[in-house]
């Protein structure tokens, strides 16, 4: 079977499906190829299911807290959790969202081909169709090969978990994908890697009742973030009873598969008994298995090199999202996908965001937007920075979340805001205000002079700006 289309997209994750929807809205004939589930890693085994599990763990942890001596005066019986039902609830959310994506694609005239793509050249892709259908006529036969020719080829294949050669996935060694759908809770989970994925899931498992040990090669948790932001997270891990081994390296599993061999900070080799090991040392662009090498594109290491319109080194071949390297964020891929569709439709667009927010859903949450004080200094900018502590925020007190702060970074000469950082309860929801202020070119005076609702966590944003101006009101 042979098909012709204007735009062919490989990958139905956030970048790919958003590009397809926008292309459909603009009247571009579009085919989307996806071998697994629509929504990609983010909707199926990443952003959405992880936040669902984190929420369930937090609610269970609160219930356990109320069974003890709660200062709120709430008393409950000792709670229990049905993990299978929790996972089913999580999967219900995923199903609703992925189903919604499929409906939006159909509504906008996008033909979805279920199957695994292999690139033949920059204009031709061969797809081995999956059994069991899809939304397009190409799927009706099931299991057959479809050849698709296109004018524009958009690569949106995403990323995959990094596997350690001495700790391969399988059995009790799992990636985040398996960690999000546990049939049972482990008695002892060892997490390899103290980045955001390892800490988000490690914290959730600890709140669900598992014993958790984290092994990290760096000298602190969240090593990609500055020490002021990671310190409250480390303190919370300690209070939860998570065991940390910093400046330590994993060597592999013991012969009987019941222990993780590790070299600690003192150079001693020790063994940690574990009935499950989560490897969360990062992700890498998914470049293998679909014939990418046949295009001989310019690369940045393992990532496809693109310009500020997401064009690759081959004419009318585009790439977006995790395939193009850091930052590997779903919202970056979405913005790139929308832009590519508009460029193909004849609109003038460039991908030049002033800032892209990054959020860690740890406990407490961490948000980074724009430049930190050190990054600003490294760029030769003369900046001022100021922090406002949650301990001085009334709303933070009422939700028992006084750990953390909001920090602003602005140029000293004209007070232009170039960065925000925050750590604390609920700070993920402040990320929109942070990125909007930078994108719109706000000054400290703009944020300081904006009336913020009281009592809210957002007041800390205004207070940080006021403090940078030298006249904070509540500290």
Image: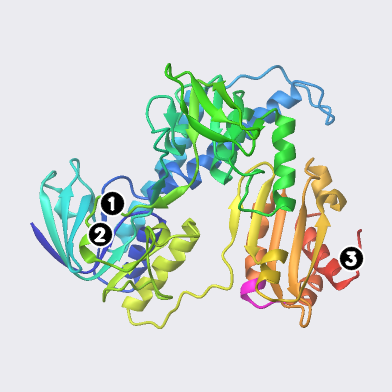
Instruction: Please say if the residues under marks 3 and 2 sit with CB atoms less than 8 Å apart.
Output: no
Q: Position of residue 242 (x, y in %)?
A: 66, 30
**Residue matched to label 2:** 292
In the picture, measured across the screen, residue 413 lies left or right of residue 256, that is right
Q: Position of residue 204 (x, y in %)?
A: 59, 33
Q: Decide: marks 1, 2 in contact (CB < 8 A)? A: yes
Residue occupied by mark 3: 472
Q: Which contiguous range is marked in magenta?
A: 437-442
Q: Quadrant of the C terminus?
A: bottom right
Q: In front here: 397 or 284?
A: 284
Q: Is residue 265 above or below residue 211?
A: below
Mark 1 to mark 2: distance in Å? 7 Å
The disc, 3 or 1, on the residue closer to the chain's N-terminal end is 1
Question: Nearer the observer, disc 3 or disc 2?
Answer: 2
Residue at 76% across, 82% down: 414
Work out which quarter of the rendered image holds the N terminus and state it.
bottom left
């Amino acid at each position: 079977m042979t098909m012709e289309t204007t735009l062919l997209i490989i990958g139905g994750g956030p970048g790919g499906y958003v590009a397809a929807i926008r292309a459909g809205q603009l009247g571009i004939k579009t085919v989307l190829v996806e071998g697994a589930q629509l929504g990609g890693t983010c909707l199926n085994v990443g952003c959405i299911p992880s936040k669902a599990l984190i929420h369930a763990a937090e609610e269970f942890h609160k219930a356990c807290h109320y069974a003890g001596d709660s200062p709120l005066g709430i008393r409950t019986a000792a709670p229990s959790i049905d993990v299978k039902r929790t996972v089913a609830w999580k999967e219900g959310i995923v199903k609703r969202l992925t189903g919604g994506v499929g409906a939006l694609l159909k509504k906008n005239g996008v033909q979805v081909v279920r199957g695994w793509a292999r690139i033949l050249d920059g204009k031709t892709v061969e797809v081995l169709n999956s059994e069991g259908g899809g939304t397009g006529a190409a799927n009706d036969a099931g299991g057959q090969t479809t050849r698709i020719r296109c004018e524009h080829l958009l690569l949106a294949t995403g990323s995959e978990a990094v596997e350690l050669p001495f700790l391969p996935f399988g059995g009790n060694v799992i990636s985040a994908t398996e960690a999000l759908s546990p049939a049972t809770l482990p008695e002892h989970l060892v997490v390899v890697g103290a980045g955001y994925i390892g800490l988000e899931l490690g914290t959730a498992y600890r709140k669900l009742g598992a014993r958790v040990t984290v092994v990290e090669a760096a000298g602190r948790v969240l090593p990609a973030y500055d020490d002021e932001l990671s310190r409250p997270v480390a303190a919370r891990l300690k209070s939860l009873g998570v065991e940390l081994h910093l400046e330590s390296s994993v060597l592999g599993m013991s012969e009987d598969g019941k222990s993780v061999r590790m070299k600690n900070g003192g150079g001693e080799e020790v063994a940690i008994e574990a009935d499950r090991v989560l490897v969360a040392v990062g992700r890498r662009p998914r470049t293998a298995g679909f014939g990418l090498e046949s295009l001989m594109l310019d690369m940045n290491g393992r990532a496809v090199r693109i310009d500020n319109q997401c064009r690759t080194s081959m004419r009318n071949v585009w790439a977006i999202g995790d395939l193009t390297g850091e930052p590997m964020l779903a919202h970056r891929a979405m913005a790139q996908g929308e832009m590519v569709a508009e460029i193909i439709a004849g609109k003038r667009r460039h991908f030049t965001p002033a800032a892209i927010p990054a959020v860690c859903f740890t406990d407490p949450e961490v948000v980074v937007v724009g430049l930190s004080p050190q990054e600003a200094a490294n760029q030769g900018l003369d900046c001022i920075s100021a922090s406002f502590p949650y301990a001085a925020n009334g709303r933070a007190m009422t939700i028992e979340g006084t750990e953390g702060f909001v920090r602003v970074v602005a140029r000293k000469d004209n007070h232009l805001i170039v960065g925000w950082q925050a750590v604390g309860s609920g700070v993920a929801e402040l990320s929109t205000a942070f990125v909007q202020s930078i994108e719109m070119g706000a000054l400290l005076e703009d944020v300081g002079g904006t009336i913020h609702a009281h009592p809210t966590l957002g007041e800390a944003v205004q207070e940080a700006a006021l403090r940078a101006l030298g006249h904070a009101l509540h500290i």
